[in-house]
Amino acid sequence: MDKRRAVVIGSGVGGLTAALALHRSGWQVTVLERADSLEPVGAGIGLAPNAQRALDVVGLGDEIRSLAAWQGEGGMRAPSGRWLSRTDASAAAERFGGPLVLLHRAVLIDRIAARLPASAIRTGCPARLTDPGTAGGAPAVVATPAGAIEAELVVGADGIHSGVRTALFPDAPGPSYAGFTTWRVVVPAPDRPFPPHETWGRGALWGTQPLKDGRIYAYAAATAPAGARAADDEKAELLRRFGDWHDPVPEIIAATAPEEILRNDVYRMADPLPAFHRGRTALLGDSAHAMAPTLGQGGNQAIEDGVVLAHHVAPARDLGAGLAAYTADRLPRTSAVVRKADRVSRLMSLSSAPAVAARDFLMSTVSRLGPGLVLRTFDGIADWRPPGATYAAGTTEEAPGTRR
């Protein structure tokens, strides 16, 4: 029998993970990307153990773990440099079953795409869902410049302003502004070593994290009106906001060219969708549950989505029941992560001196009581395990790293 066809709209981390998981489980997969290449818009991405275990399902987990750069202590600091809390990499790995891996988004995209057939990815191909199909009957239909494509499954992975989401749920509330903007850069590492850190100030934060290739991924966030931009350039804006913070923050800003700085306002979906599927069409990643980056889980949850979707719609299973199971698995979990990320965002956004002092005191107190209390923030998130078989291994055993 011919393979069932799946069309994935969007070639971000979640879309490509879904494409690879579907391909490994027996689907004929086509990825449609409107951009002319797979060069990702973005800088770094942090993959927590939950995403690494999801990547085990498609045979990439150990390859990604080998890129971990964080060793020893790190933690949270105040702009003066004072440590608010400390966390050890080995303690985090022991608690959650793996290290935190920071890497450039382009590296992750390349590693996933390389495992797909070259003919599976079509760049320069904008796509629009014209019919979501019916699970037990008509196929879904996607319009492209080259003509319509019919498919047994369509996956909307087209980002926070998803056209697929709008087509499926036109009356659902869309994403809303989270109240802050972000900057991201990747630069050569300073000459002297430093412990990785995230620094929280008044309505602002800065993170400095090492990459395996010797570069630094730095990111910043600050409360700002939606759509605001620097009158001169974003390097000057970073200097105004963070230039007097502790080392190595000023040095990293000085090493950054203005044109290399990515600035994006943060939008998230505070109101969950009624479902993550309709007919023969499913949503994943930012299309389904855009979240604030304050837990570093946006890409991680998209990767989880991809492997869970493929698990539930395996070719031997009923598609309608599989998509319903996908929604039942993913909607409660991702909604909880969205809410938790919003709570952390509110802490980060505090700007009055008394409120910031109380927040910092609480962080320091919790840290002194034990590093396990700090890590507990990620209980129920970083310890997630994927369902079903490891497709890469072709067995019914659990994926590596999932022993209970």
Image: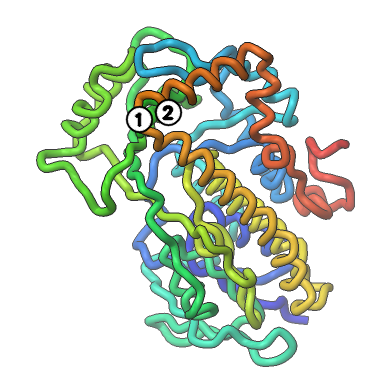
Q: Residue at x 55, y 16 (%)?
A: 364
Can residue 218 be seen here? yes
Q: Residue furthest left?
A: 232
Circle 2 Cα neighbour tier, 10 Å, few/some/many (<14 / 14–19 / ≥20): few
- Residue 103, image x and y in percent? 49, 34
Q: Amino acid at mark 2?
A: Ala
The image quadrant where one finds the C terminus is: top right
Q: CA distance from mark 1 to mark 2?
A: 5 Å
Can residue 216 be seen here? no
User: Please, is residue 184 above or below residue 38 in the view?
Assistant: above
Q: Amino acid at mark 1?
A: Ser
Marks 1 and 2: CB-CB under 8 Å?
A: yes
For residue 124, side relative to residue 324 (left or right): left
Q: How many marks?
A: 2
- Residue 58, image x and y in percent? 70, 50
Where residue 252 sits, quadrant-wise, is top left
The image quadrant where one finds the N terminus is: bottom right
Question: Which residue bears the numbered disc 1?
Answer: 352
Q: Residue at x 10, y 39 (%)?
A: 232
Question: Which residue bears the numbered disc 2?
Answer: 355
